Image (cartoon, rainbow, N blue to C red):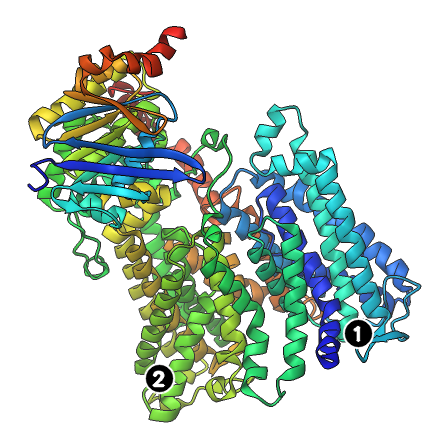
Amino acid sequence: MEQFFGFAFTGLPYGCTYALVAVCLVLTYQATGVFNFAFGAQAFASAFIFTWLTQYKNWSGFEAFLVSVVAMGPLVGYAFDRLLFRHIANSNTTAKMVCSLALLVGIPSLLPVIFGPQNLDATATILPFFNPNVVYFTLAGQPINGIDLSAVSVTVVVLVLLTILLRYTALGLQMRAAVESRRLVQLDGVDGNGVVAVAWIVSSFMASLAGVLFAPTFGAFTQDDYVTLTVVAIAAAAWALLRSLPIAAGMAVFIGVLTTVLQGYISPSSFFYATILPSLPFIFLVGALLFLPKMRELDASRDPLATIDPPPPPIAAASRAPTMNRIIRTLWWIVFAGFCVSMLTWIPDSWTTVFNNGLTYSIVLLSITLITGMAGQLSLCQATLAGVGAFTAAQLATHLGLNLLVGGLVGAALAAAVAVVLALLSLRLKGLGLALMTLAAALLFDATFFNETSITGGPQGISVQAKWLGTSAFFNFNGHAMFLLSLGVLIVVVFLVLLVRKGTVGRNLAAMRGSETATAGLGVNPSWQRIMVFALSGAVAGIGGLLHSLEQQVVSPTDWNADISLVLVVLVVTTSVTTVEGAIQAGIGFFVTEQVLTTVLPARIGGSSLTVVLFAFGALTYAAHPEGVLEYQKRRHTMRFERLFFAKEAEAEERKAARAISTSGANG
Amino acid sequence: MADGDHLLSLRGVCKSFGGIQAVHSISFDVDAGESVGLVGPNGAGKTTLFNCVCGQLRPEEGDVVFDGTLLNGMPTYKRARLGIGRTYQKVEVFTDMSVRDHLMVAERARRGEGRLWRDLCNMSNPTADEKERVDATLELVGITQLADISVNALGLGNCRLVELARALAAEPKILLADEPSSGLDLRETEELAAVLRTVQRERGTAVLLVEHDLSMVAQVVDRAVVMDVGAMLAAGTFDEVMANPEVRNAYLGQVDAV
């Protein structure tokens, strides 16, 4: 029994930091309706600054705490609210999720851009009277040092203070009311924006606090360590139905303690230690999503004033005057022909690779166009599905000698099958629930299949061999063969996506986005529609994954992990998730921007990180322009151009529509 | 047609939410081509009963039989394919879609179509037959001129008509209309009543109408069922139930008081 308690006490400091972030998630969701995925990133950012100040600037732990937590936490929270989330308070769940995902992706990428790459080793504690190197006492044989004491004591104090704030103050009552409708409480004379700002400030402070308490438990830490913090917190918040702070905190502590207890009892060389233990938080998360019926109702809009919001604008292509449409289509064909000729003639090898990468990425991104653009759901495991396709093809080539491209079709089928399983598991989930389920799946794959050397060849991946393709043409530096292959597959996929969009399934999905209840009431089976689009999306991602790995000449697990899934979403929503050209622009735009930044800027800044940051900032505009920044600009400039050259035609179209509405029986 | 030749039969349907009995042992029938009004004050359980018939809610007790088929446990989309159409108290339109596309979704859903392979083979273009039926429904409801306009541009009155046209495009055997005149002015309400009468008489579609506007109910229905606090209070011809003292007390009495 003493051994059990010894293991349990070891997990307590971890559990406490998980609890802080879990409480942040619940608090923010309850007060603002935003599920902020970025709390883990905020925690990492504070830990980064805290450690940088103590390790490289020789500040004391307390001084660094004042800057990285007391000042930075609330400031960041206030900035999030004032500059971003306040403006999307009335947006749908997907828009809010996309913005928080953009922050999750953007914040960790921004740090190396500002500070340069750092080796961080946290050794200081925030409280001067707790020395990290001193063992104060032992509990069940376990030494308790200053790091453990500060983590537990600070968490307890903060949670007690928060409970008092929420239960016994007028501000707490107003916070609970604001979640229903910020606009409605304003009608009652409450400063709804101020109330929500306080919620952001408090929760961001707590996330920052969790970050600096968490770092010394690792010593040397990286961003990956904070993924665990985020996922455990999400799982705990899910078990609390994003409502109960005590349950969220208790569940987080339980998961932290259970992990260390299992670590103590299970042999480190066993299969369970390597696969099940790292997956424990995801298993808890999936369990909550599958077995708690209330998790299916998360997306139900509760704002009584939601009906006063205007509908989203139509995409540019749908609102153009016919002549303008013809001109733009012709221009697109000219640009396309020019691009093809250039790729096959004068473009240098280094840029050929860039464009080929962009084309293959575009195929993967089109899988998001299917799920998010057409079905209106957010999948956070598209990179995983791409990886399933790529690794399947590589394994079939390695063990059976199957041609890689033929194996790619098998891989696409397997990726489709995985997507169908996910769709079946998530049949009753929508919006946030579905996003969490797909995120859990991506992380589960990272911890299990993609972590298995026999499948992925280890962190370095599996090198693609020319004999698997029957030709070395795809490895030539001029990249012409690869270009033609990528372009051919991309064109086929684009046509398939367009056919689905204009077909019955596409129309049904569009109807479901408007009202799933009414669609089912007409005789459409929503579950079946969703399964079909998931299957197609999985297959497209699988094929894209193989082609991109082929271009890289290696199938690597780091190319297709959960982080990449998040980046993919951020990329495509920045341009346009509703159009096929949005996916292509995102794919090519990402690699072109990265190449330009790498060439122009110093290596310290890092072209890749900065590119992700730029796209993440672009994705933050999703709520204001759910059609994508590029699509918004396209519509804006198209309208300006129309007013100049086709004013009469555009006006005639508008008049025709207005006349039809005014002469109908009930014009409202 | 089984069950005594009734198109829709409700037998002791009960539904509660927590401790609140929203619908308590409701039983009545609707015959093919008949128009029945379901009236009662707010909170009487009319919409809950509609949800039980359509499958959006599952009754705890009782049976719902439609066209000889026991519907208990059957999902909403399968009930719709059997011929149950519906409009909603709070308008449910498909944002961003044109009016014609609304009807096309219904037209295809009626036949349970929506196969991905047909889309991928470019075999999903609307046929001449489908276009003709959609146009006929648009004309019946009187919104032909709105066919290619996005519902985003329409007001509440037009949206209600679109909802009605969409439900009729599925060619239901029974139409459950949930407060279709809500938010409409007097002229619009009269036009809507005329459409419902036409649908019933020319297409032979049975209509189960939930409506607070009793003058509209009187114009449209052959019989009426009155509900109050989840229970059935009276049933009969419209004039009979309106003359019922209990009904007057529970429902009309409140109106008089106002």
The image quadrant where one finds the C terminus of chain A is: top left
Give x and y (percent) for residue B199: 13, 27
Of badges 2 and 1, nearer the viewer stands: 1
Marking on residue A404: 2
Point out the tag, 2 or 1, that comes first from the N-terminus. Answer: 1
Give x and y (percent) for residue A518: 30, 40
Three-letter amino acid code at disc 1?
Asp
Residue at (32%, 88%) from the top-left corner?
A402
Image height of A97 relative to A468, above or below: above
**Quadrant location of residue B255?**
top left
Res. A319 in view:
no
The image quadrant where one finds the N terminus of chain A is: bottom right
Res. A549 in view:
yes
Q: Secondary structure at mark 2?
A: helix
In the rendered image, the residue lying farthest to the right is A129
Along the line of sight, which residue is nearer the eye, B180 or A529?
A: B180
Image height of A237 relative to A353, above or below: above
**Which residue is the site of mark 1?**
A121
Q: Secondary structure at mark 1?
A: loop
**Quadrant location of residue A4?**
bottom right
Distance from Cα at disc 2 to Cα at disc 1: 43 Å
**Quadrant location of residue A411?**
bottom left
